[in-house]
Image (tube, grey):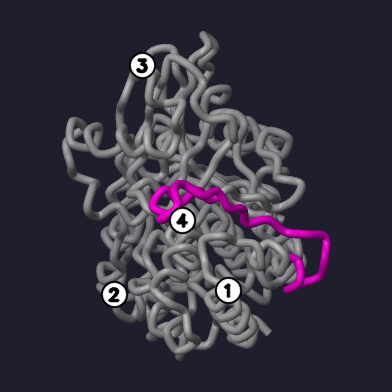
Amino acid sequence: MTTQHAVVVGGGLAGVTAALELADGGLSVTLLESRPRLGGLAFSFKRGDLTVDNGQHVYLRCCTAYRWFLDRVDGTALAPLQDRLDVPVLDVAHPRGPRLGRLRRAALPVPLHLAASLARYPHLSLAERAAVGRAALALRSLDPADPALDGVDFATWLGRYGQSPRTIEALWDLVGIATLNATAAHSSLGLAAMVFKTGLLSEPGAADIGWARVPLGELHDTLARKALDAAGVHTETRSRATAVTRTPDGGWRVTTDSGPLDADAVVLAVPQREAHALLPHGALDDPDTLLDIGTAPILNVHVVYDRKVLRQPFFAALGTPVQWVFDRTDTSGLTDGGQYLALSQSAAQDDIDEPVSVLRAKYLPELERLLPAARGAKVRDFFVTRERTATFAPTPGVGRLRPAARTHAPGLFLAGAWTATGWPATMEGAVRSGLTAAHAALAGLGRPREDPLPGFAAETPGRRPA
């Protein structure tokens, strides 16, 4: 068979996945990335002797595509999963003083796997806990792919099932803000149903949490490059695509800073605004809908103390602006007895543009409220990382704006967590989009490839889950 060439524009998780799968399918592949590194918005950088992740990224056992990615780049052992879901939740605003609760699962079938934990959850009243059970059963009956759910906000639906504002804060938003990057009031019911039905109500271990025990750059850049090289992919960093046009013979030409590249297939694995700028005329019915997909910010607050102030690997917080706190000491390379904590603040519209001095004055006292050991500790370093367009905004109605991988232009495909994966903007969604685009491209070139994940084809854009 004649060698066919594909160009993938964008070296985030979607682009790296697409490039690997296209190469595994027998194509000659060039991957273009404008930055000097791969990994997109899940990367690391150096700050003095520390290796810092731009933000805390986690995944769940149900994230089968991202787990496939980790295995494909030989990174599974570096980002292990919990044996069982166990989330400490600390409420510092309780009338009787700070109270610690836990969301953990038992070795029982769904939904009994969470029943005991919910029955003992101290942050809700008995009546509120009972109401959670009724809402969970109703969630199990929803089809996240039903277009009617896309136009309803999650908070309205929760209200119909008796969920109090406290229940939404202490349970539904505790999970939802971290996974959707929006509160229930600003989240599509379809996307919320996908998160909770898949993560909490599908398999007993679906919500077990995994995270990298090495810097993200080691997984998404170093190991990814090694896998790309081994697959024969030609990777060009610091290379920006400026145009995508048809060639006279019906192929494609990608114009870059360093010259043109001809291809039989092109995958645009870049954010929606960049994709809009590169799309040729007629590729989508209404390309301007890409510009209507909003974005949402994530702020990460980084604090280095001179001593250990937290003994858990992470916890979630209530009654405070602090959302989730992670111990990043070992991952960062800090070895002098201090401790490095990272606060992951999703849906951070109110804080994303605040000066560091304002954020320091806001968050250090909150950490002292949460962690008594921090009250006498010296702060060696305090800094923030900001991703103003970290994710697409999961607002009601966003589903009808998200395009499928296939365009009207044969041989041109879209990838990115913002495309129609059925998932919110997560690492899982990004990898799924790359697999979908690659498989569509291979099929179009007469090289159909078996789906790498059981049941994956049923969830690809353009098809509704059964």
Name the residue beneath numbered marker 2: 289
Q: Are marks 4 and 2 in contact (CB under 8 Å)?
A: no
Please tell me whether residue 440 is drawn above or below residue 408 in the rendered image.
above
Three-letter code, disc 4: Ala
Q: Position of residue 9 (x, y in %)?
A: 43, 49
Three-letter code, disc 1: Leu
Residue that sits furthest to the front in the current view: 96
Q: Residue at x 39, y 84 (%)?
A: 156
Three-letter code, disc 3: Lys
Please name which of the two marks, 1 or 2, marks the residue nearer to the observer: 1
The answer to whether residue 400 of the structure is visible from this angle is yes
SS of the residue under disc 2: helix
CA–CA distance in space, label 3 to label 4? 29 Å
Q: Are marks 1 and 3 in contact (CB under 8 Å)?
A: no
Query: Which of the labelled discs sits on residue 178, or is there none?
Result: 4
CA–CA distance in space, label 1 to label 2? 45 Å
Between 448 and 136, the residue placed more toward the observer is 136
Q: Residues within 10 Å of mark 3 (few under 14, many from 20)?
A: few
CA–CA distance in space, label 1 to label 3? 41 Å
Residue 360 picture quarter = top left
Mark 3 or mark 1, which is nearer the start of the sequence?
A: 1
Q: Which residues are magenta?
A: 89-113
Name the residue beneath numbered marker 3: 378
Mark 4 or mark 3, which is nearer the start of the sequence?
A: 4
Three-letter code, disc 2: Thr
Name the residue beneath numbered marker 1: 126
Q: Residues within 10 Å of mark 4 (few under 14, many from 20)?
A: some
Q: Residue at x 55, y 57 (%)?
A: 434
